[in-house]
Amino acid sequence: MIKENKKTVFSGVQPSGDLHLGNYLGAILQWAEMQDKYSCIFCVVDYHAITVRQDPAVLRDRIIETAKMYLAAGINPEKSVIFQQSDVSAHAELAWILNCSARIADLNKMTQFKEKAGKNQETVTVGLYDYPVLMAADILLYNTDAVPVGEDQIQHVELCRDLAQRFNRQFGETFKIPELVIKEEAARIMGLDDPAKKMSKSAASPANYIALADKPEEAAKKIIKAVTDSGKEIIFNKDNKPAISNLLTIYSLLSDESIKDLEKRYRGRGYGEFKEDLAEVVKEFLTDFQERLYKIKDSDVKDILRAGAEKVRPIAEETLSRVKERVGIK
């Protein structure tokens, strides 16, 4: 819940594709751990999802499913606010105003756009190009103190900080400047089929990721088939052994054991035995997670999202009103 004596955290996930283990370990698990220390606002960022074409019926379902994932992962609506981005119109309004401070040069630096658009930069939507500005609006609306992100979102939060500081210099103190919060060991969970690329719900092959909705037995098979490095040593070394380092990270975060302890346990033992044990850990995690997930009713989720929007809307509208006054349109 939003409390004045606590710092405010804001973050969100797109309801596009299947949420996977990388989303959970890199973001949502961290959110759950922050709920007692911070006033937490967690958003299902559906406006971000439509920067690429979505099937409307599928998107509606995924909005609900994403919120369910939050709840199953331990986000407690009694402690935190969960809401749907498009239910608060101030997000879109502030994004437009910030667009009038953002520069083409700012957005041309965004490496994630270049990765997503590839060779099609001239034909993708303006929304895909511009969505870091909308993300800045998401964060700044709620006087956010801290933004927990994965490594791939650092550049976007830095842009948010730059836009806020630029606006403050031009129009006077308006926005709080948010800080980054990064859980280093989970900052970037890599693909099981290619440790040079991050685990991604948009990956061409399902062997890249473990979806939170995967059957536990299928997920275990993906771990068994995951690529490994040359040599037999099970040690954490991102440069020389990126595949095993990634699997050690997953193992450590799911089992709550340190990587050093895992290295000691598997000293002198082979990759096969290590992956079989990790497969069991993943299988047990998914079984427990899905047991909680499938008990959550759609109607309850809709009520939670609606209530969440009602709680944060006054904060967003107060910020937007202040911004409009500063720029002279109110």
Image (cartoon, rainbow, N blue to C red):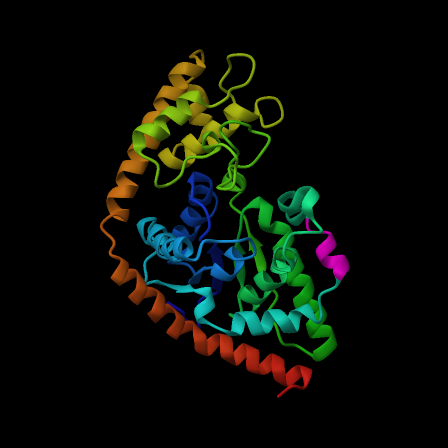
Q: Which residue is located at x 46 percent, y 44 percent? A: 23
Towards the viewer: 246 or 301: 301
Specify whether residue 200 is in view.
yes
Q: Residue at x 48, y 53 (%)?
A: 54
Rendered location of residue 291, percent (x, y): 24, 43
**Extreme residue in the bottom direction:** 330
| Residue 225 shown left or right of residue 136 in the figure | left
Q: Quadrant of residue 127?
A: bottom right
Rendering quarter of residue 170: bottom right
Q: Quadrant of the N terminus?
A: bottom left
Instruction: Indicate whether 324 appears above or below 165.
Output: below
**Residue 168 placement (x, y as % from top left):** 69, 74
Q: Position of residue 268 (x, y in %)?
A: 44, 11
Q: Tell me the magenta residue range.
A: 104-110
Q: Main secondary structure of the magenta part?
A: helix
Residue 106 part of the magenta segment: yes
Image position, residue 109 (x, y; %): 73, 51
- Toward the left, the furthest residue is 295
Judged left or right of residue 54, residue 162 is: right
